[in-house]
Image: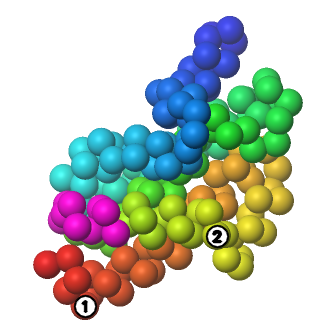
Amino acid sequence: MRHLWPRVARVIATWFGCGLVPGAPGTLGTLGAVPLYWLVSRGGCSAVALAAVVVTAVGIFASSTVQLELGIEDPQIVVVDEVAGLLVTMIPIPVFSWKALLAGVVLFRVLDIWKPWPIRRFEDLPLGLGIMMDDVAAGAIGAVVMAVLNARGVFG
């Protein structure tokens, strides 16, 4: 099992290879989260929240493993953090909607790239915790915005 974990960790950390595509791995990782979100959204907000927690927990260990293996702080190939961040962003949306998903993807990517206060502070956490938690924080801010937009009827 010890020899298997680094390979499994790389698959999870790169979100099944999304992070290995050159160019915009963060955006591709976010888009790679869409099938999972579509699937778990059928169970409502609590299912999306549970998926976000599971992806975050597993992502901390997987991204730590890959970071230590490569010897690079926050390697670009690690995109499981984008998956967790998008899921967190989408928690307030009770029913799947392409309009809400598009807004959530754009909002999350803007927050993840811009990293307004206090998001950037989470990058200072050690190993996979720092990799994951800045995107989870961006997702939390995104979730507040999505909740407001949803309450105002923007998504239907």
Label 1: how many Cα within 10 Å (few below 14, some 14–19, many 20+): few
| Main secondary structure found in the magenta portion | helix
Count all numbered tags in the image, as a single digit: 2
Q: Which comes before the other along the chain, label 2 or label 1?
A: 2
Q: Is residue 154 above or below residue 128?
A: below
Foreground of the two, 94 or 111? 111
Let me know if residue 53 appears in the view: no
List x then y, in percent, for residue 64: 73, 36
* Quarter of the view holding residue 107: bottom left
Mark 2 to mark 1 CA distance (whole Å) = 25 Å
Residue beneath label 1, please? Answer: 152
Foreground of the two, 47 or 36? 36
The residue stretch that appears in magenta: 95-103
Residue, far bottom: 152
Residue beneath label 2, please? Answer: 114
List x then y, in percent, for residue 11: 54, 24
Q: Is residue 5 left or right of residue 35?
A: right
Q: Three-letter amino acid code at disc 1?
A: Arg
Q: Secondary structure at mark 2?
A: helix
